[in-house]
Structure formats: structure tokens, C-alpha cells
Amino acid sequence: DVKVTQSSRYLVKRTGEKVFLECVQDMDHENMFWYRQDPGLGLRLIYFSYDVKMKEKGDIPEGYSVSREKKERFSLILESASTNQTSMYLCASSLWGGGEQYFGPGTRLTVT
Amino acid sequence: QQQVKQSPQSLIVQKGGISIINCAYENTAFDYFPWYQQFPGKGPALLIAIRPDVSEKKEGRFTISFNKSAKQFSLHIMDSQPGDSATYFCAASIRIRENFGNEKLTFGTGTRLTIIP
């Protein structure tokens, strides 16, 4: 079974803090993704990566950056957290070429 | 810009009934249409997917109907069960560049389905 794990289920940070969200997958997938999920807006793609050290902007990259130093690990970075970044963050992975994306359980981030 | 519009936002169906969720898209270059199912506290999981060269795909009680000319597709859940209560997302995908596959998914806004006894 593919397993995608996220470092925290719940996280509370203060405005202006630098926040790191970590994601690890164990199936040697080439692609990894970060989404945010908000009620009424569905899932929106922030960034994805198709190879180590490679990244592509998604639909809402502003205020976020990513890092992929190893194939199995993909990090989402909020350089200076703001209250409008309070959300559920979901990580996913897939094989090269697309197809099924496997999601982690999500990290609920609250920025106060 | 909402490229995939999903309705209804919420749906209540009696056990044994048919649940129908609809999606419409704008970009005719989309060529892969998956549906994801999400239970509370879990990430979404792929339920069923279709490509536009067929009009229907069935897997057990779940069927996707696809209307290319109308740019619409829908999920039908036959004999709906309480265990089907979840949030459902439609999605669409396009090849972003020559050397890529269907990596980039655009999701609908989700439908919260509740099956009542």
C-alpha cells in the first residue's frame, strides 16, 4: 500500500512565523503535490514537483515555497504565515505520467 | 477562475436510492476525469476515472457518465449505502507540456453526500 505521511495533523502558528510542513511518501513516486482544502473551494494546487529539486507552480503559489531535496520528501514552506493561510493542507504523490494521486491525511494549520 | 463546476454542494439520499453528482468543465483540452472520495479525517482517495473517448464507465455501484459535447460528467452511485456518506470531488486534468502526463488536476468544489437509513 502506498503511504503518504504528513509531519503534523494539527499545527497552530502565529502571524509572521516561518512554517514548515513536511510530507514523505514510501512508494518511489516521481510526482509530489501540495494542495490546500477550504470549504466551498475544493482542493487547490499550490505547487508540485516532478523530480528532485524540480518544482512547478500550481494555481495559488503566492505566499508559499517548496523544497524537494530527496525523492521521498516534499516540504511546503510559509515564509511569513498570515491568517488567510489558515487551512487544511494536503500532500499527494503519483507516478510519472499522472494518474492516481495518493493523499496524506492532511495538516490543519491555524494561523493566529 | 473555476474551471470545473460541481453541484450540488450537499446531497441527502435515502439508503438504497441513487446519488447523482454533476460536474461541468470549460477547457476542452481536459482529457482525464477522475472522481475522488474523502471521509472525515482522511485524505481524498481515487474512486473511479474516465477518459473522453468513452461515454460511460462502471465499477460496481459507481458509474461515470460523460457527455463530451455538453462538457459535463456525472457520478452515479446506485443502491446508496450509509458507508457511502463522504465528500466527493470531481476533477479534470490536462497535459501541461509535451513531456508530461496528466499530473495537474483541477478539482471541483466538492459535494457532501449523506445517506440516511
Image (cartoon, coloured by chain):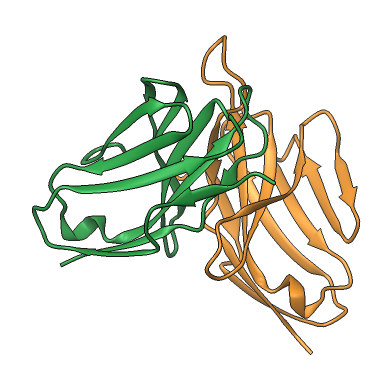
Q: Position of residue A62 (x, y in %)?
A: 24, 38
Q: Quadrant of the N terminus of chain B?
A: top left
| Quarter of the image with the C terminus of chain B in it | bottom right
Quadrant assignment, res B17: bottom right
**What's the residue at 41%, 27% (across, down)?**
A70
The answer to whether residue A59 shows anywhere in this view is: no
Measuring 56% from the left and 71% from the top, which residue is drawn there?
A: B40
State the residue at coordinates (21%, 41%). A63
Of residue B67 and residue B37, the one placed in the foreground of this image is B37
Residue A101 place in picture, x, y as percent: 61, 40
Q: Percent x, y for residue B75?
A: 76, 56
Number of numbered markers = 0
Please say if B93 is above or below B42: above
Q: Chain A shown in which color?
A: green
Relative to B20, B94 lies left or right: left
The answer to which image quadrant residue A39 occupies is bottom left
Q: Is residue A72 above or below residue B110?
A: above
**Which residue is at the far left?**
A16
Residue toward you, A60 or A14: A14
The residue depicted at 55 percent of the width and 37 percent of the height is A93
Residue sitting nearer the eye, B24 or A7: A7
Left or right of A59 in this view: B18? right
- The colour applied to the residues of chain B in this rendering is orange
Report if residue B99 is visible in the image. yes
Q: Position of residue B61 (x, y in %)?
A: 88, 61
Residue farthest to the bottom?
A: B117
Q: Left or right: where does residue B66 sit relative to residue A37?
A: right
